[in-house]
Amino acid sequence: MVEDGASLGPLELTRGRWGIGDATRPDTHWVEFRPDGLHQREPDSEGRLIPWSGIMSGIWLTWGKTSGNTDSRGMYTLKGTVAGREGGWMHMTLRRPYEDCRLRFDRHARPYRAVDALRLEYLLRQLIDEGRPHLLGSPEWVGRAVAHLAGGKNSWITQRALRQATAEALEAAGPVSP
C-alpha cells in the first residue's frame, strides 16, 4: 500500500482515498474516487456523485479558474510543469442524462509535472474506453497503477508513449484485490 501524499499530477492519496485536487485545505474543491463513482467535493455542500456506469467517454483535464475555455488544454512551462496556480477541471460525457459534465478541483501548492498530468489523463481514458472505470474505486489498485506511472523522465512524449505507459501500468496494477 502506498502512503498518503503519493501523487500523479493532480491525483493524490489523502486519508486513504485517491482524489484529483487538494483535499487537505479547507474550502477547496476536489474529485474523490470512491467504490461507487466520482464524488465532487465542494465547500458547504454534500457534493455530487457520478456513478462509474454513468461515465460515457471523453475524460480530459483543463487548467484555469473557469471551465468555459475547453478548447485550451492549458499552458506548460519550459521546465515541463503545468503553468499557473489556478484550479482545474475534469471534463467528461455522461450517459443518463446525456450531458457534458465538468468537475472542478483546486490545485495543490506543489507544481504538477506535465508528463504526470498527461499520464493520468490517459489512464482515466483507457479505463473508461475499456469499461473498467470501477477500478479507480480501489485505493490499492490505483496505488499500484500510480506507482508504475509516476516518476521517470519529464520530457515531451508522444501519444504512442502515453498509450504504452498506460498499458504497462494497467498490466502492472493487475486485478483488483478481493
Image: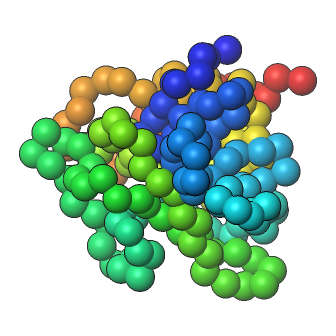
Q: Residue 151: image x %, image y %?
A: 36, 24
Scheme of colours in the image: rainbow
Residue extending farthest to the right is 178
Tell me where residue 55 sits by quadrant.
bottom right
Residue 177 vs residue 161: left or right?
A: right
Quarter of the image with the C terminus in it = top right
> Depth check: 26 or 11 in front?
26
Tag count: 0
Residue drawn at 79 percent across, 29 percent down? 176
Q: Residue 118: image x %, image y %?
A: 38, 48
Residue 88 vs residue 91: left or right?
A: left
> Depth check: 101 or 15 in front?
15
> Depth check: 33 or 120 in front?
33
Residue 100 vs residue 113: left or right?
A: right
Residue extending farthest to the left is 78
Q: Is residue 11 above or below residue 151?
A: below
Residue 7 vs residue 145: left or right?
A: left
Residue drawn at 60 percent across, 17 percent down? 3
Residue drawn at 53 percent across, 29 percent down? 146
Q: Residue 86: image x %, image y %?
A: 34, 59
> Depth check: 102 or 144 in front?
102
Tell me where residue 135 sits by quadrant.
top right
Quick check: can you spot residue 51?
A: yes
Quarter of the image with the N terminus in it = top right
Residue drawn at 27 percent across, 49 percent down? 82
Quick check: can you spot residue 168?
A: no
Q: Residue 50: image x %, image y %?
A: 76, 64
